[in-house]
Amino acid sequence: MNKPTIYITRKIPPYLIEPFSQYFQFQMWEDEHTPIPREILMREAKEADGLLCLLTEKIDRAFLDHASHLKIIANMAVGYDNIDVEAAKEKGIIVTNTPDVLTETTADLTFALLMATARRLVEANHFIYQDKWGEWSPFLLAGTDIHHKTIGIVGMGRIGEAVARRAKGFQMNLLYHNRTRKKTVEQELDVSYVSFEELLEKSDFVVSLLPLSEQTENIFDKRAFEQMKSSAIFINVSRGGVVDEKALYDALKNKVITAAGLDVFKDEPIPSSHPFTSLSNVVLLPHIGSASITTRENMLTLCLENIRAVFQHEAPISPV
């Protein structure tokens, strides 16, 4: 009996695939860095029984109509706004994601980005490479304290909770806003639930960990930045689409807020000519929230375990 065919949309190491080769035959896009072109993905997925994809792949209704053999789509991410989940459900295709395995790693990166932005670390690093370091002066590259400040977390999911735990170590005052209150988390972490507007007004650091949806798209707009303190720092490690990037650029350029640290953007990758790159008060990262070797291995393994479970008539581990 022929093994089911699984198509993988980016090159991954053979040692991760090998344990599953007894169950499946694998085909993949043999490029580690460049997303598979749409027309090639459509062609390759036409006969595939399962798909392991990234956020860079748009799995819409047209794709699902075309890839009629699919039983499962394993998305290598927590978010799944790249997939038309309703259309997949209509067609009986299971969609899975990779929660939990990247929580702590992404929280590490979130707090690292917050610290780098507050203390102007990238700017300071460039200062040396540009041979600008001369005599010491009292306010040379002086940044913002983190300890004992107020952090406002917008989106208190698993990653938000992990960021809150890190903030407690810096003796920060914690506020959060979420679609639903989490009273157990409030008690455990001594974090206060407030409205979105109150969070913006009171926070020294506003951290976005929101999923992208119709309700959250462009939620950080001109009005939101104007509600923040002029000393506030904005951090986004969720989805670029939750931010009106023109409004954020204007807020940074005109000192409406002090700085921003961004790991995600509306259209990725961004070019070196992007307006944000002209600003000295923003730290830009290329969407590396979960980018540790161990975590990326765990994410891919979870995708493959979900696929194995479905084809062995078991419940998937992490269904959407």
Image (spheres, grey):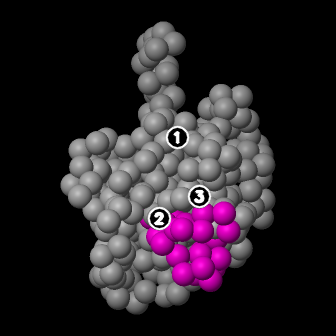
Nearer the observer, 50 or 214: 50
Identify the residue shown where x is 51% and y is 12%: 130
Q: Which residues are magenta?
A: 65-93
Position of residue 221 in the picture relative to residue 53 (left or right): right
Residue 78 is situated, as x and y percent measured from the top left of the image, at 46, 65
The answer to whether any part of residue 30 appears in the image is: yes
Q: CA distance from mark 1 to mark 2?
A: 32 Å
Q: Which residue is mark 1?
A: 286
Q: CA distance from mark 3 to mark 2?
A: 9 Å
Q: Which residue is mark 2?
A: 49
Nearer the observer, 313 or 147: 313
Position of residue 272 in the picture relative to residue 24 (left or right): right
Q: Amino acid at mark 1?
A: Pro
Query: Is disc 1 placed on a helix, strand or loop?
Result: loop
Placement of 273 over or under 95, stated as above or below:
above
- Sequence-wise first label, 1 or 3: 3
Identify the residue shown where x is 62% and y is 83%: 90
Identify the residue shown where x is 74% and y is 40%: 253
Nearer the observer, 295 or 15: 15
Residue 82 is one of the magenta-drawn residues? yes
Q: Amino acid at mark 2?
A: Asp
Query: Is disc 3 placed on a helix, strand or loop?
Result: loop
Q: Which residue is mark 3?
A: 46
Which of the 4 image quarters holds residue 158?
bottom left
Q: Amino acid at mark 3?
A: Lys
The answer to whether any part of residue 162 appears in the image is: no
Rate crowding at label 3 as few (under 14), some (14 to 19) or many (20 or more) other CA atoms within 10 Å.
some
